[in-house]
Amino acid sequence: MQVAPHPTEQMQSAVLILHRRLGDALLGVYLHGSAVSGGLRPQSDIDLLAVVQSELTESQRNGLLLDLLHLSGRHPAVPGGARCLEVMVFCQAELNRGDYPARAEFVYGEWLREAFEAGETPMPERYPEYSMVIAQAYQEAIPLFGPPRGDLLSEVSTEQVNQAMRDALPDLLDGLGGDERNVLLTLARMWHTASTEKFITKDAAAEWAISRLSGSDAMTLNHARRAYLGEVTDDWSSQGDAVRELAGRMSENVTNSMQQG
C-alpha cells in the first residue's frame, strides 16, 4: 500500500519540481495561506507562490503541469492522503509594476484539474483574486527557496485589495451551489479583511463573523466552520435557503465595511 506524503514532503517535492522545470528563472518559492497563518486544517490546500525572472515557455508550462497533476491530491482531500496543491507563478516584472488586477504567469489548483486533464494548459491571465493572494503573501509568506518575501513581493494597496474583493464577489456568489462551505468561509474572510485590513484563516474569520451574526446565520456559518475543521459532515442538502440568505447578507457586509473604511 502506498504511503501518503507528509505535507512537508509535498512542499519539498513541489519546490524540486519548480527548480527542475524552471531552472535559473526561478527566483523564489513561498509558502502562504493556512499553513502559515494558522496551521493546515483537514481540507486545507498547500498554497505556494513562485516568482520567476521571465515568462514560461510552452515546454515549461506543460512539464510543470504534468508534475503537479501527479503530486497534488484530488479534491476533496482524503484523510491521511496527499494534500491539494495550489501553485501560482508570477513574473518579477509584473509584481514590480503592481498593475491591477495582478497577472499570474501560471496557476495550478485542483478546481482546474478536470480542464487540465481534458488538455487545457495554464496560460497567463489577470484576475482580481491574484491581487488578494499577493497581498496576503506579502503579509505572511515564508520562503521555501529564495530571499525574504519583501525582496520579491510588492505590497498591495488597500484600494486594490478592496477593488479585488468587489470584483470577485459576483463570481463567488455564482459559485455558491455545490461549494457552500468554501464560499461562506471566503465571504467571512473578506468581511474580516474589509473591516481590519488583515488576513486570517478561514476558521478564525468565521469565528470573528459568527460573533457579529445572530440566529440561523450564526448557526449556518458555524456549520461551515466545523465542516472545514472536520468536525461535522460537509452536507448542505437541507440548508439551501439559509445558505443563500447568509451569503447575500455577508456580501452586503463586505461591501458596507469597505465603504465605511
Image: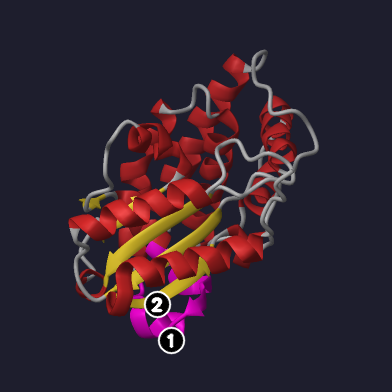
Q: Give neighbour class at mark 2: few <14, some 14-19, many 20+ (Cα, 10 Å).
A: many
Residue extent of the magenta highlight: 134-155
Residue 240 appears left or right of 124 = right
Mark toward the start of the polypeptide (1 vs 2): 2
Magenta includes 137? Answer: yes
Residue in the foreground of this view, choosing between 25 and 190: 25
Q: Do the residues labelled 1 and 2 touch (CB within 8 Å)?
A: yes
Figure quadrant of the C terminus: bottom left
Q: Distance between the residues labelled 1 and 2?
A: 7 Å
Residue in the foreground of this view, choosing between 170 and 227: 227
Q: Where is residue 126 in the image (x, y as percent from the top left)?
A: 23, 52
Please report the residue visible at 55 percent of the width from the left and 50 percent of the height from the top: 189
Relative to 134, residue 224 above or below: above
Badge number at residue 28: 2
- Residue position for label 1: 147
Q: Evaluate whether residue 202 shows in this view.
A: yes
Magenta includes 136? Answer: yes
